[in-house]
Amino acid sequence: MLASDSNDKKPQRVSLHTVERLSVYRRKLEELSHEGVEFVHSHQLAAMVGVTPAQLRRDLASFGSYGNIARGYEVAKMIATISRIIGTDKIQNVGLVGVGDLGRALLSYRGFEERGFHIAAAFDVDPAKVGKVFAGRRCYGLEELERVITETEMRILILASRPEGLQEIIDRAAAVGIRAFLNFVPKTTVAPPGCFVERIDISAKLEKLSFLVQRGEGETGRSVA
């Protein structure tokens, strides 16, 4: 049985590494839930995700979530607890800038909804795309960026546009409430005060894998971040 999940506790400072591990734990717990598993011990879950049992227990215990000694962690309750901790227990509206090949692929990806994120609107500068519907989402011109963000109460914006004018888009979005950006654009940007920019560089990841392949690092069968 889990310990108290009281919401009146003062929020703790949590490292981003811990948050990343929590996401991994939840993903594995969801897999176990789909397989009909109701309880899992800390050493079992730790082995599945590649951390030590001590690390896993520290990560979860810091939020007041403890397992039952006899049966371990209750899978369904742990999923709910972690979802609440990272703020995905309720659907969040997200925006997308750029409806090119990558943007359309992201719009069609159903995994976002399953993880608690709904792409509520898309934006593009191409007049041929503005006003059209892609994967059920309407595409707006960038001149409507502030209005749509405000009306949909977005706090996260996915960037999949061309590099030109990217910083201006970030600054405009931040001024009306966007606090986090997931950036797929190969361009260095500056996060406005109080905002976060998470860069996803797929080419860099491929270069890293190429390096590991050249050195034969993959022969050990280990995972790399």
Image (cartoon, rainbow, N blue to C red):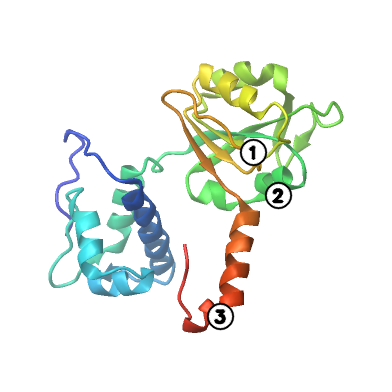
Residue 187 numbered mark, or none: 1
Mark 3 packing: few (<14 Cα in 10 Å), some, or many (20+)? few
Residue 216 numbered mark, or none: 3
Q: Residue at x 16, y 35 (%)?
A: 9
Decide if residue 8 is on the left or right side of residue 202.
left
Distance in Å between CA atoms under marks 2 and 1: 20 Å
* Image-quadrant location for residue 173: top right
The residue at which mark 2 appears reads as 105
Please report whichever mark, 3 or 1, sits nearer to the chain's N-terminal start: 1
Please report whichever mark, 2 or 3, sits nearer to the chain's N-terminal start: 2
Extreme residue toward the right, this view = 128
Q: Is residue 41 visible in the rendered structure shown here?
A: no
Distance in Å between CA atoms under marks 3 and 1: 31 Å
Relative to 57, say whether 131 is above or below.
Answer: above
Identify residue type, mark 1.
Answer: Lys
Q: Is residue 172 visible in the rendered structure shown here?
A: yes
Return the x and y of residue 57 as percentages of the image width and height.
20, 61
